[in-house]
Image: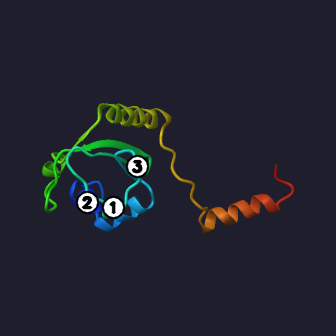
Amino acid sequence: MRADAWLWVARFFKTRGLAKQAIDGGKIDVNGGGCKPAKLLHAGDALKISRGEERLEVEVLALAVKRGPASVAQALYRESEASKLAREAQREQRRLVGVQAPRQRPDKHARRELRRLKDDPGRP
């Protein structure tokens, strides 16, 4: 089965196109080497998957012809213990640090207030 199709069937990516983009972007390694979207996967292959900040190491247990429910998709692979522990540690680290909200541009009123503060030399 093609690597991009398996990643989609196993529900690592929402569409096959996104799986293909991840493979082309070097986010997927098969058996310690690079991967192309049409690479054939077999049971027993080891995959390293990077999605955003998340890193997964999985072993392919089975191949499926069509995409099914999540419970079926989870039976297609097994995540390594080291990968599970690393993801838990990362999740705990994010919880302790606290996820900061992304910086937003000031809106119209905030910009006017900033200009007023910067332009007034008498204000501290």
Q: Locate residue 56, reporting x and y percent.
A: 35, 43
Residue, x 69% and y 61% (percent of image)? 113
Residue topped by disc 3: 33
- Please determine whether, in this image, residue 46 is positioned above or below residue 7: above
Q: Secondary structure at mark 1?
A: helix
- Give the distance between the C-alpha atoms of the residues marked 1 and 2, in whole angstroms: 6 Å
CB-based contact (under 8 Å), mark 1 and mark 2: yes
Please identify the quarter of the rendering in which residue 38 is found: bottom left
At numbered mark 2, what does the secondary structure look like: helix, strand or loop?
helix
User: Residue 85's image quarter?
Assistant: top left
**Residue 15: quadrant of the picture:** bottom left
From the top left corner, tell me how far across and down residue 2 is, in percent.
25, 61
Badge 1 density bin: few <14, some 14–19, many ≥20, Cα 10 Å: many
Per the rendering, the mark at residue 85 is none
Q: Position of residue 90 (x, y in %)?
A: 42, 36
Q: Which amino acid type is shown beneath numbered disc 3? A: Gly
Residue drawn at x 16%, y 49% is: 62
- The number of callouts visible is 3
Q: Position of residue 82 (x, y in %)?
A: 34, 31
Name the residue tied to disc 1: 19
Give the amino acid type for the residue marked by disc 1 in the picture: Ala
Side (left or right) of 77 relative to 33 = left
Q: Residue at x 44, y 46 (%)?
A: 53
The residue type indicated by label 2 comes to: Trp
- Which is nearer the N-term, disc 3 or disc 2? 2
* Label 2 neighbour load within 10 Å: few <14, some 14-19, many 20+: many
- Tell us which disc is closer to us: 3 or 2: 3
Residue at 45% across / 60% down in the picture?
25
Question: Which residue is label 2 attached to?
Answer: 8
